[in-house]
Image (cartoon, rainbow, N blue to C red):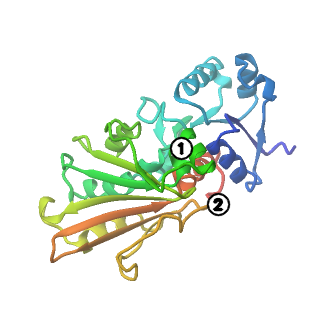
Amino acid sequence: MSQNLKTIFIDGEAGTTGLGIRERLAAVPEVAVKSIDPDKRKDPAARKDMMASVDLVVLCLPDEAAKESVALADQLGSDAPKIVDAATAHRVAPGWVYGFAELEPGHAGKIAKADRVANPGCYPTGAIALLRPLVDAGLMAQDHPVTVNAVSGYSGGGKSMIEDFETGVAPAFELYGLGLRHKHLPELQAYARLTRRPIFVPSVGNFRQGMLVSVPLHLDALPGRPGIADLHHALAERYAGSTYVSVVPQDGKGGKIEPEALNDTNKLELTVFGQDDLGQAVLVARLDNLGKGASGAAVQNIRLMLGLPEG
């Protein structure tokens, strides 16, 4: 093994996100992934020793297990590795940098300097990408009553939904999270800079992966009553020059959009649909919930934290 290689341990590498990260890292020649003996994957001493031997640890674990892993790393002091947490546990926690590199100008630099980065959720990635530039530009009030609707393939709905899809018992379409306490809401509200809790309605369709996140708007309820072009310009200006985020005109889409076009990529595509004469718009984000919504974003953050080319 080359002495110049950066070493990575994926704690929870057998899960959907862990497998995706490992597959993507296989195409990164500057890193080597180290694995723990399967018989010792729940042994705190063995995991702690592994953490001390690598440059960076990726946590692909349930929230409580992720917190336990961070506590183990804390015990290593100056030997502690950098950490990317793909769980929900630290997304709004003090001392952690939110891992959406395109959040605002200069944010990728914050990730590059960070020792602890919380990988974003798939749904918030799309919603924050749409909303934050409008709030920052003054085109949307921070207390605006926002509704976010989203549909994902079954791989975005958790272990039980994945099992239902793979065994063929999943319904064609299903709304969920109707208790309005979805675990992604805190980060969505915090990083979109909203002071009013948004309504978030997720759903799954009977396909494996791919995601659409949409936000309907009445233009006359926004400050200054902006037009479709104003909303598009605010998004395009924010993401100009971005490698992974693009803002696409609604022209040519025929008033419809499907969720799977960006699968197996780290791309995020934003579009403002609407009609000025009706005073209505629908903001739409398209992404792969396993790509920019999970493993792709994690590898993007890993590259930044280890000083590697963006790729």
Which is nearer the eye, 299 or 286?
286
User: Mark 2 near mark 1, Cβ–Cβ under 8 Å?
Assistant: no
Q: Which residue is mark 1?
A: 161
Image disc number at residue 311: 2
Does residue 88 appear left or right of residue 28 in this picture?
A: left
Identify residue type, mark 1. Met
Does residue 219 appear left or right of residue 15 in this picture?
A: left
Report helix, strand or loop for mark 1.
helix
Residue 247, x across and y down, in percent: 41, 69
Report helix, strand or loop for mark 2.
loop
Residue 26, x across and y down, in percent: 76, 52
Placement of the C terminus among the 4 image quadrants: bottom right
In 3D space, how far apart are the residues under numbered discs 2 and 1 (Cα atoms)?
A: 32 Å
Image disc number at residue 251: none
Residue drawn at x 58%, y 21% is: 68
73 relative to 292, above or below:
above
Does residue 282 appear left or right of residue 295 in this picture?
A: left
Residue drawn at x 36%, y 44% is: 188
Q: Residue furthest bottom?
A: 252
Nearer the camera: disc 2 or disc 1:
1
Mark sitting earlier along the chain (2/1): 1
Residue 228, x across and y down, in percent: 24, 72
